[in-house]
Image: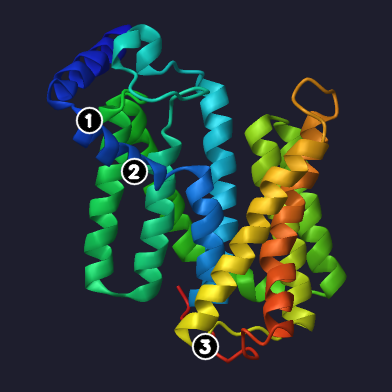
């Protein structure tokens, strides 16, 4: 393994021979498209403005994929390149390296969208973006090439399972009693959190719990459609994102910090509230403000 990691460091050094301010800025922007903060805006935008059902499916798949990535990182406990050679790290990064979260998430998100849309241009754009996001992690010295390859492979396997099972699982869940749906969402998220109680797991599973509860209630009580004028969709995104930001930042200021023994459960609750807002609070508010019509059927294409 040491020889493989050293080969990776040497490759990064070779790649970084071309680095400069312009390329550094470009790849920082590209790598941002794989960050948590990007998905915290992008996935709600899909759900509120493009296709609610597809956005909900993708959000759940994304969160479960993130959980798998976190568990594997903590299992393998592999270093990052700048831990072997501090000179290669062009941006700060925390945690273990293998497999690459950015590479895996790029396959999950853009692969799912391409499969849903059935558009050749989106497949091409998605593949290019997947490659660029993965390469950006190597260029910036925060992942070994093997981390990225592992992330891509895990993403492809996860995507294949998702495409095969998503429609059938959704039909079964939709036919369940409301309280059973809520119980399934809460129990699944809490059990996965208790199995691996870590910082990033708390955020992912908290969001999953909140989103699951919100989706069950929205399906029953909020008739929400994504169609509308461009200004209605823009206002939905701006208002919804502003409140996401307020919850994200504001609750951090009042909830226990990492030094507290209650940090993880409160982080779970923190992200749970964000999940409920995205899937229930925002659709309800948009309908109240007449920024969204009643649900159109169908509101999506099956994946």
Which element is circle 3 on? loop
Alpha-carbon span between mark 2 and mark 3: 30 Å
Report the residue at 45% width, 64% height from top. 163
Looking at the image, residue 236 lies above or below residue 242: below
Report the residue at 57% width, 59% height from top. 59
Mark identifier at residue 228: 3
Q: Are marks 2 and 3 in contact (CB under 8 Å)?
A: no
Examine the image and state in which quarter residue 254 appears: top right
Determine whether, in the image, residue 189 is placed left or right of residue 153. right
Report the residue at 52% width, 88% height from top. 228
| Residue sitting nearer the eye, 139 or 115 | 139
Looking at the image, residue 39 lies above or below residue 181: above
Report the residue at 52% width, 78% height from top. 233
What residue sits right under mark 2 in the picture? 29
Q: Which numbered mark, 1 or 2, is in the foreground of this view? A: 1
The N terminus, quarter of image:
top left
Lower position in the chain sequence, tag 1 or tag 2: 1
Which element is circle 1 on? helix
Mark identifier at residue 21: 1
């Amino acid at each position: 393994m040491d020889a493989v990691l050293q080969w990776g460091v040497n490759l990064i050094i070779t790649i970084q021979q071309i680095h400069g301010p312009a390329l550094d800025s470009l790849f920082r922007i590209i790598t941002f498209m794989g960050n948590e903060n990007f998905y915290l805006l992008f996935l709600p935008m899909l759900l509120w403005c493009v296709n609610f059902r597809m956005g909900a499916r993708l959000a759940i798949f994304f969160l479960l994929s993130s959980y798998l990535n976190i568990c594997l990182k903590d299992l393998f406990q592999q270093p990052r390149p700048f831990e072997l050679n501090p000179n290669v790290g062009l941006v700060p990064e925390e945690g273990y390296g293998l497999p690459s979260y950015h590479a895996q998430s790029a396959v999950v998100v853009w692969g799912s969208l391409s499969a849903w849309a059935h558009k050749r241009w989106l497949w091409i754009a998605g593949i290019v973006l997947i490659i660029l996001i993965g390469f950006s992690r190597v260029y910036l010295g925060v992942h070994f090439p093997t981390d990225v390859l592992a992330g891509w492979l895990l993403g492809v396997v996860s995507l294949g399972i998702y495409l095969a099972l998503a429609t059938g699982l959704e039909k079964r869940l939709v036919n369940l009693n409301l309280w059973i749906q809520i119980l399934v969402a809460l129990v699944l998220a809490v059990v996965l959190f208790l199995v691996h109680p870590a910082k990033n797991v708390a955020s992912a599973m908290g969001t999953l719990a909140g989103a699951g509860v919100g989706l069950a209630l929205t399906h029953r009580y909020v008739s929400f459609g994504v169609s509308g004028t461009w200004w209605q969709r823009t206002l939905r995104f701006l208002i919804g994102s502003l409140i996401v930001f307020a919850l994200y930042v504001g609750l951090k200021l009042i909830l226990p910090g990492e030094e507290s023994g209650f940090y993880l459960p409160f982080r779970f609750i923190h992200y749970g509230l964000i999940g409920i807002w995205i899937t229930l609070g925002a659709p309800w508010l948009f309908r109240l403000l007449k920024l969204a019509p009643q649900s159109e059927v169908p509101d999506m294409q099956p994946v």
